[in-house]
C-alpha cells in the first residue's frame, strides 16, 4: 500500500486553458457570482480533496509579460480570492480553503487578520498561497515603487536578479510578520475575569516589534490567534530563489517538475513537510479524447497551450499511475489545475478519486476537521510561550 | 406619508458599552456570533449590519487596555462570509483611508458587492495617528490636518476605479469568442497630492455600481466630507436638540454639492433598554450602567479626561482636586473619542461641581455623565421616541448598538420593530435586493 496522497485543486476562471470559457459546460458569465465558486468548491469537497486554491492578482489578467494586453477573447476581470474563500466557507464544512494573496504591495497586518478571520469563519480550514508580484504594471496600481519589467527573456540580467532577490527578501519578512501576528495572542488570552473586570490577560498578548528593511510592525494583531494557530502557508516555486523562500517560510510548496527525476531534485531543495507538484490536467475516458479536447481548445485559441507546469492529457487511471510514480520521488501530493471547469474537476472527483481509492492511495472520507489536520500537521505551539523557541 | 425609518445593527464594540460579563454574553470572535446578530437584523428587516474597526489595540497608561472586549475579525473577510448566511441585509464595513491603498480597497469592496449581490457599504474613517501607523508600512506618515484631504482623494480615486468598467463590459459570447466588448476596459490614471497611480482595474462593475458610502467623522472637515461624498452619516448625536442641530448642519451643506436633502441619511448611534413598564426599564437601565461602568472602568474613563494616572483614587470616593494634564501626549491611545473633550479643564470643573452638588462618587459621576442609554422604556414608548426623533428631523434612523453579544437585538426585533411597522414607518418586507434599495438611494450612473 502506498502512503496516502494529498490532492488539491487550483481553481482559476473557467479552467486553466484560456479558451475553456467557450466550452458548453463553462459558465463564463457567472465568474463574478458566489454561486459559481460555491458549486466548484462543493464538488471538490464531495471528492474529499484536501483543499482548493483560488488564484488572484493585483492586476488584470494579461498574456503579455510586460504589461496589460488589449485582448477581448480571453476571460478578464476577477474577484478578490480571500473574499471568495470566505463567502464559500459557511457553505462547506471540511475542505481547506487556500486563497492567493499578494505580498508585494499589501500590508502584512491586513493579510494576517484576513487569513486569521478566514480560519475563524471556516472553523480551522484556512490557508494562504503567498504570491510575490514582480509585475511592473501592478506596481503602477500602487504608485509607491517602480519595478523593472521582468520578462522571461531577461530574468538572468543582474538588474532582474537583484529585483527578484529583493522581492523574495521582502516576502520572507512579510510571512515572518504574518506568522508572529498570528501568535501575538496566546490561545487563552481571553479570560473574562469578573473579579478583576479584565476581559483579557494582557501578559498573554505580545508586541511582535518587527523591524526590518522593508517595514516595521509593532503588533499585537487585532484578531485573536486563529483556530489552527498557524493557518497553512503555501507558495508556488519555480527556481532556486523561490525554493529557498518556500523552504524558509512555507508549510507547503507547489513545484513544477517535468518528470519524476526532476521532482526528486526539487524536493531535495525544499525540506518542508509538504511538496506538491502542479499539473494541468485534461481528463477523458480515453487518452485520445483527452488529447483531442486539448487540440480543439488550442485550435479555438489559435495557440498551442503551454504552462509553467507539466500538462497531462489522458484518463483518470493513467493520471493515477503518474501521480503514484511521481509520489515515489518524494512528493506528498499534487495540486491539479483543471484545464476546463467544471469538466476536469468532475473528472478528478468522480474519476481520479475513486481510482486512487481503489488503489488504497486516497481517503474515502475526511479524517480531520482542520486543514492542518488533513495534512497531518499538528497545531503548533505559540512562539511567544515561555519555553517555546522564539524565531 | 410619514418619513420611513432606517435601522442598522452595530456588532457590539470594543468599548465599555458592551457588557461582556453578562451571563448571556457570547463570543466576540467566533463566526456564530456574527451570524446570530446578522440573522436577527435581517429577520427584523433592518437596512444593514455594521462593523466598526480599529487597527491598533487600545492602550492606556502605556499598557494594552484590558477592561473592555478586545479583539475583532478582519472586516472584509467576515462580511463576505455573512453574505452567505443572509440574503437582503446590507453589509457595512469600516475601512480606514489612511492605512490602505485605493486599488486594493476598491477591489475588496467591488468583490464584496458582487459576492453579496449588491449589499456592500463602506464607512470611510480617517484615523491617522502615528500610534496606529506603527502597524503599517508607512508608519505615522499623515498629519492630522491632511486626514480628510487624503480621504477625499482616496474616495475620488476609488470611484474612478469603480466606474472604470461599464456595466455591459463583459459579453462572454461563446459563439463569437468575444469576452470583452472593449480591450482597454478598466483603464485609469489618477494623480494628486496623495496618489499617483495608473493601469487597469481588475473587478468588473458590481451590482450597486459602487458601495454605499458612510462617514463617521464629527469635525467640520468630517461633515463637509460627508456632505460632498457620503450616502449616510454615522453620528454621535441621538437626542432631540443635539440631533436636530447636527441634522440641520449637515443637510444645509448639501445644496453646495448639487445634492438633495434625501440623498444623505443621518443615522446616529443608539443604545436601548426595554422593560415591561417604564419603571422596570429604568431599573434595568441602571443595572446595565453599573455593569458598563465598574469601579475600575470609572477610574480609567476619568483618566481619559484628566489625562493622568488616577489609579490611586477610590472609585467610590470624590473626584480628584487636581486639574487635567493638557499636554499633547495622551494617556489613552487608539480611541477615536479621546479628542471629544476639547477643553478638559473646563469639563473637569463642571464634573467636580456636579459631583459635589449631587454628592456623587467618581463611579456615580461617570455613570451619570457618559453614554447613558439613548432609549429606555417599554417597546411602545421606545417605538414612539424613535419615530418622533425621525419625524422631527433629528435623524433619518438609527444604528443600534446592543450591549450584549450576540442576542442583544432579539427583544428589540421582536417587540419594537412590529410597533414601528404598525405605524407604517418601517418596512415589513424588503422592497428590493440591494442596500441602495433599502436606503432609497439612486444607482450611480
Ligand atoms: C459614531 C462614530 C463612530 C466611529 N467609528 C469609528 C471606527 O469604527 N473606526 C475608526 O477608526 N474611527 C471611527 N470613528 C472616527 C471617525 O470616523 C474619524 O475618523 C475621526 O473621528 C476623525 O475625524 P473627525 O475629526 O472628523 O471626527 C467614529 C466616529 C464616530 C462619530
Image: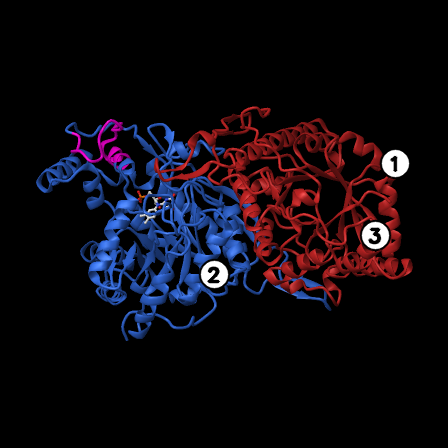
Mark 3 and mark 1: Cα distance apart in space? 22 Å
Q: Is residue B233 above or below residue A101?
A: below
Q: Which mark is residue B106?
A: none
Q: Earlier in the sequence, mark 3 or mark 1?
A: 1
> In the rendered image, what is the letter of the chain coloured red?
A
Looking at the rendering, the quadrant in which ligand 1 lies is: top left
Residue beneath the point at 75% across and 51% down: A337
Residue beneath the point at 57% across and 41% down: A140
Query: Along the line of sight, which residue is nearer the eye, B331 or A355?
Result: A355
Q: Is residue B304 magenta?
A: yes
> In the rendered image, what is the letter of the chain coloured blue?
B
Q: Are marks 1 and 2 in contact (CB under 8 Å)?
A: no
Q: Is mark 3 within 8 Å of ligand 1?
A: no
Residue occupied by mark 2: B119
Q: Is mark 2 within 8 Å of ligand 1?
A: no
Give, as a single range, the part of the protein colored magenta: B299-320
Dot 1: element: helix
Mark 2 and mark 3: Cα distance apart in space? 43 Å
Does residue B248 appear in this view?
no
Residue occupied by mark 3: A356
Amino acid at each position: 500500500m502506498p502512503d496516502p496522497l494529498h490532492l488539491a485543486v487550483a481553481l482559476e476562471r473557467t479552467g486553466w486553458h484560456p479558451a475553456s470559457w467557450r466550452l458548453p459546460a463553462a459558465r463564463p458569465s457567472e465568474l463574478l457570482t458566489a454561486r459559481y465558486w460555491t458549486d466548484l468548491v462543493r464538488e471538490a469537497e464531495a471528492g474529499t480533496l484536501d483543499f482548493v486554491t483560488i488564484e488572484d492578482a493585483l492586476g488584470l489578467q494579461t498574456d503579455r509579460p510586460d504589461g496589460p494586453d488589449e485582448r477581448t477573447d480571453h476571460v478578464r476581470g476577477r474577484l478578490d480570492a480571500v473574499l471568495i474563500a470566505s463567502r464559500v466557507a459557511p457553505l462547506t464544512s471540511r475542505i481547506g480553503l487556500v486563497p492567493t494573496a499578494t505580498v508585494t504591495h499589501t500590508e502584512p497586518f491586513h493579510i494576517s487578520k484576513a487569513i486569521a478571520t478566514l480560519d475563524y469563519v471556516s472553523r480551522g480550514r484556512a490557508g494562504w498561497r503567498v504570491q510575490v508580484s514582480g509585475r511592473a504594471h501592478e506596481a503602477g496600481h500602487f504608485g509607491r515603487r517602480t519595478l523593472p519589467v521582468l520578462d522571461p527573456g531577461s530574468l538572468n540580467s543582474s538588474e532582474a536578479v537583484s529585483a527578484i532577490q529583493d522581492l523574495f527578501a521582502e516576502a520572507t519578512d512579510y510571512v515572518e510578520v504574518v506568522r508572529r501576528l498570528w501568535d501575538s495572542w496566546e490561545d487563552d488570552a481571553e479570560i473574562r475575569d469578573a473579579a478583576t473586570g479584565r476581559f483579557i490577560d494582557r501578559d498573554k498578548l505580545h508586541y511582535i516589534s518587527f523591524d526590518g528593511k522593508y517595514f516595521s510592525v509593532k503588533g499585537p494583531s487585532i484578531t485573536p490567534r486563529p483556530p489552527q494557530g498557524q493557518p497553512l502557508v503555501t507558495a508556488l516555486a519555480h527556481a532556486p530563489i523561490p525554493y529557498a523562500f518556500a523552504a524558509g517560510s512555507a508549510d507547503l510548496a507547489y513545484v513544477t517538475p517535468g518528470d519524476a527525476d526532476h521532482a526528486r531534485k526539487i524536493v531535495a531543495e525544499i525540506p518542508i513537510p509538504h511538496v506538491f507538484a502542479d499539473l494541468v490536467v485534461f481528463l477523458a475516458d480515453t487518452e485520445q479524447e483527452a488529447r483531442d479536447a486539448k487540440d480543439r481548445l488550442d485550435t479555438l485559441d489559435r495557440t498551442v497551450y503551454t504552462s509553467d507546469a507539466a500538462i497531462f492529457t489522458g484518463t483518470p487511471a493513467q493520471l493515477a499511475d503518474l501521480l503514484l510514480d511521481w509520489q515515489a520521488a518524494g512528493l506528498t501530493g499534487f495540486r491539479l489545475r483543471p484545464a476546463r471547469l467544471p469538466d476536469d474537476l468532475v473528472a478528478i472527483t468522480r474519476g481520479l478519486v475513486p481510482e486512487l481509492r481503489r488503489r488504497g492511495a486516497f481517503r474515502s472520507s475526511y479524517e480531520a476537521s482542520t486543514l492542518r489536520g488533513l495534512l497531518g500537521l499538528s497545531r503548533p505551539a505559540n512562539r511567544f510561550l515561555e519555553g517555546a523557541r522564539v524565531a | 406619508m410619514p418619513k420611513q425609518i432606517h435601522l442598522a445593527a452595530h456588532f457590539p464594540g470594543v468599548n465599555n458599552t458592551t457588557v461582556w460579563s453578562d451571563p448571556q454574553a457570547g463570543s466576540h470572535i467566533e463566526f456564530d456570533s456574527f451570524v446570530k446578530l446578522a440573522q436577527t437584523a435581517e429577520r427584523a428587516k433592518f437596512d444593514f449590519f455594521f462593523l466598526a474597526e480599529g487597527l491598533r489595540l487600545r492602550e492606556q497608561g502605556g499598557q494594552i487596555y484590558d477592561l473592555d472586549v478586545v479583539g475583532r475579525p478582519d472586516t472584509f473577510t467576515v462580511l463576505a462570509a455573512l453574505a452567505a448566511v443572509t440574503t437582503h441585509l446590507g453589509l457595512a464595513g469600516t475601512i480606514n483611508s489612511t492605512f490602505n491603498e485605493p486599488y486594493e480597497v476598491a477591489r475588496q469592496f467591488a468583490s464584496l458587492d458582487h459576492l453579496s449581490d449588491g449589499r456592500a457599504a463602506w464607512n470611510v474613517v480617517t484615523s491617522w495617528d502615528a500610534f496606529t501607523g506603527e502597524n503599517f508600512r508607512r508608519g505615522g506618515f499623515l498629519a492630522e490636518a491632511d486626514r480628510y484631504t487624503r480621504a477625499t482623494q482616496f474616495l475620488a480615486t476609488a470611484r474612478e476605479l469603480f466606474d472604470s468598467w461599464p456595466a455591459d463590459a463583459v459579453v462572454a459570447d461563446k459563439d463569437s469568442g468575444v469576452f470583452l466588448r472593449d480591450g482597454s476596459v478598466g483603464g485609469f490614471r489618477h494623480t494628486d497630492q496623495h496618489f499617483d497611480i495608473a493601469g487597469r482595474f481588475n473587478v468588473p462593475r458590481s451590482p450597486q455600481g459602487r458601495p454605499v458610502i458612510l462617514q463617521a467623522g464629527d469635525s467640520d472637515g468630517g461633515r463637509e466630507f460627508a456632505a460632498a461624498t457620503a450616502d449616510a452619516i454615522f453620528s454621535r448625536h441621538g437626542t432631540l436638540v443635539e440631533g436636530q442641530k447636527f441634522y440641520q448642519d449637515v443637510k444645509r451643506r448639501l445644496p453646495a454639492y448639487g445634492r438633495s436633502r434625501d440623498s444623505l441619511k443621518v443615522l446616529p448611534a443608539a443604545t436601548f433598554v426595554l422593560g415591561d413598564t417604564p419603571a422596570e426599564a429604568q431599573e434595568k437601565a441602571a443595572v446595565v450602567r453599573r455593569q458598563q461602568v465598574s469601579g475600575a472602568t470609572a477610574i480609567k474613563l476619568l483618566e481619559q479626561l484628566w489625562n493622568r494616572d488616577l489609579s490611586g483614587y477610590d472609585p467610590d470616593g470624590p473626584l480628584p482636586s487636581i486639574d487635567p494634564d493638557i499636554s499633547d501626549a495622551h494617556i489613552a491611545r487608539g480611541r477615536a473619542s479621546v479628542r471629544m473633550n476639547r477643553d478638559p479643564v473646563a469639563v473637569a470643573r463642571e464634573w467636580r461641581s456636579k459631583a459635589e452638588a449631587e454628592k456623587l462618587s467618581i463611579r456615580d459621576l461617570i455613570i451619570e455623565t457618559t453614554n447613558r442609554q439613548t432609549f429606555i422604556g417599554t417597546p411602545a414608548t421606545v417605538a414612539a421616541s424613535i419615530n418622533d426623533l425621525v419625524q422631527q428631523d433629528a435623524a433619518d434612523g438609527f444604528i443600534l448598538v446592543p450591549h450584549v453579544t450576540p442576542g442583544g437585538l432579539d427583544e428589540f426585533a421582536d417587540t419594537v420593530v412590529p410597533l414601528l411597522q404598525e405605524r407604517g414607518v418601517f418596512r415589513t418586507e424588503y422592497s428590493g435586493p440591494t442596500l441602495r434599495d433599502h436606503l432609497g438611494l439612486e444607482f450611480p450612473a
